[in-house]
Image: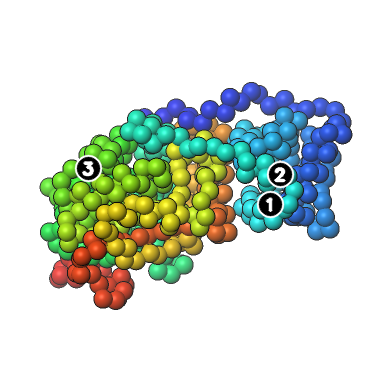
Amino acid sequence: MSSKSKELPLDFNAKPIVPTRGVPWAADKWMVRTLLRALNDAPIAIRLWSGETLYWGQSRPEVTLRIRDRRALWQLVFDPDLYFGDAYSTGRLVVEGDLLKFLDLVTRNLPQSNNWLPVLRSVISRTPRSNTLRGSRQNIHHHYDLSNEFYALWLDREYLQYTCAYFPTPTVTLEEAQIAKLHHVCRKLGLKQGHEVVEAGCGWGGLGLFMAKHYGVKVRAYNISHEQIIFAMERAKQEGVEDRLVYIEDDYRNITGTYDIFVSVGMLEHVGVSNYPALGDVIHGSLRESGCGLIHTIGRNRPRSMNAWIEKRIFPGAYPPTLKEMADIFEGHGFSILDVENLRLHYAKTLEHWLQRFNGVEEQVRMMFDDRFVKAWRLYLTGSISAFLLGELQLFQMVFSRDTNNDIPWTREHLYRRCSPLDEASP
């Protein structure tokens, strides 16, 4: 791993906090009451910079949002999707109480309101940043090249998986759940020794490494994160499987060759709906007639843009698709969708593990970056837990093949073997 940490990528244009002094204006209190009414009597209190606390409805407040200056209040009312994250990260908004409970209360109650605030949130339309060849590289650099050391602090230690784990039981460790996920993907693909695999978006190379070690396949993996590719190449050499693994620092649109298997885990969120037909072209050109593929992606039940703050500060260019939107990848090329599984609750549990580990190393993260970064990422991880638990986000695994391919499983029994074919053959 590189020992060099990156500059803080979150530019909030923040000035030193100067708490507003004096008695709140009548307009300030009107704004607060508007916020509280929009939350449909949720048990949330709002404390202003003067110390005055307001809440709406009959329920005793369970959490309190402290607003430290007038500008933060007005920004929150104007565009909560964007400015809550910025103000929270810079300390201008403080959640007193459990952050996950606060986010759950807001998510559960805000859409039910008929007030103007949710309408305002919906009409402020934003287009995700471009996912052209150049735009994708910039977007991926913003998030994934923060430094390998940062992610190694809180991801699983074995394969450094920054995607949803699979929990055969809720009590297994994160490491066990990520290995179970890797097996789950490999079994869905029906991997056999000697298969040739192409992977679009390989992260730190864990899936390809696992496939080569445990399933005896050859993998050609594409990724545009420089730091991840260097890490993956070094790890493959250390494990002695570099003869079966080729990592290429390039965009998925430049995939060449033909393969038995196409796999993409956690990349489709960064492709953009407008590029789905082009992705279909790539898969069509690279998959052999008897080939099989799997796409693993965060998704939604209904079309909706990524949260404005996450898209701007954390995941530029990201868009979680619906199943209907994903169909554009396959239609027109003679692909059959064989299996769709939703692992939404598995991702919520994965995030719970990540957040617990992140909180345990927050001082190290603060030294690498700063306090704003720690707060921003805590909010991102906590908000993601809430989104998966409340069904705002889904996790789809979709298996597909050529429509003429009859060499497909008769049942789903193969998904629940205890080990891989190579492991079974071992003494």
Q: Which mark is residue 110?
A: 1
Earlier residue among tags 2 and 1: 1
Which residue lies at the image location 60% right of the left edge and 34% below the top edge? 86
Q: Residue at x 30, y 37 (%)?
A: 224
Residue 142 image offset from top left, x and y in percent: 42, 33
Q: Is residue 231 visible?
A: no
N-terminal of the two: label 3 or label 2? 2
Is the C terminus in the top left, top right, bottom left or bottom right quadrant?
bottom left
Image point (44%, 51%), residue name: 321
Looking at the image, which residue is at 34% across and 30% down?
A: 134
Kind of element beneath mark 1: helix
Residue nearest the viewer, comparing 158 with 198 = 198
Relative to 21, residue 101 above or below: below
* SS for dot 3: loop
Helix, strand, or loop for circle 2?
A: helix
Total numbered labels: 3
Q: Amino acid at mark 3?
A: Ile
- C-alpha distance separating marks 3 and 2: 45 Å
With 317 as the anchor, is 31 left or right in this view?
Answer: right
The residue lying toward the viewer, choosing from 287 and 185, is 287
Q: Is label 2 in contact with label 1 (beta carbons under 8 Å)?
A: yes
Q: Between disc 3 and disc 1, whose residue precedes? A: 1
Q: Residues within 10 Å of mark 2 (few under 14, many from 20)?
A: many
Towards the viewer: 326 or 377: 326
Q: Amino acid at mark 2?
A: Leu
Q: Which residue is mark 3?
A: 255
Q: Which residue is mark 2?
A: 117
Q: Position of residue 425 (x, y in %)?
A: 15, 70
For disc 3, the neighbor class at 10 Å (few under 14, some 14 to 19, many from 20) is some
Q: On the rendered structure, is 202 left or right of 54? A: left
Up-down: is 20 above or below 31? above
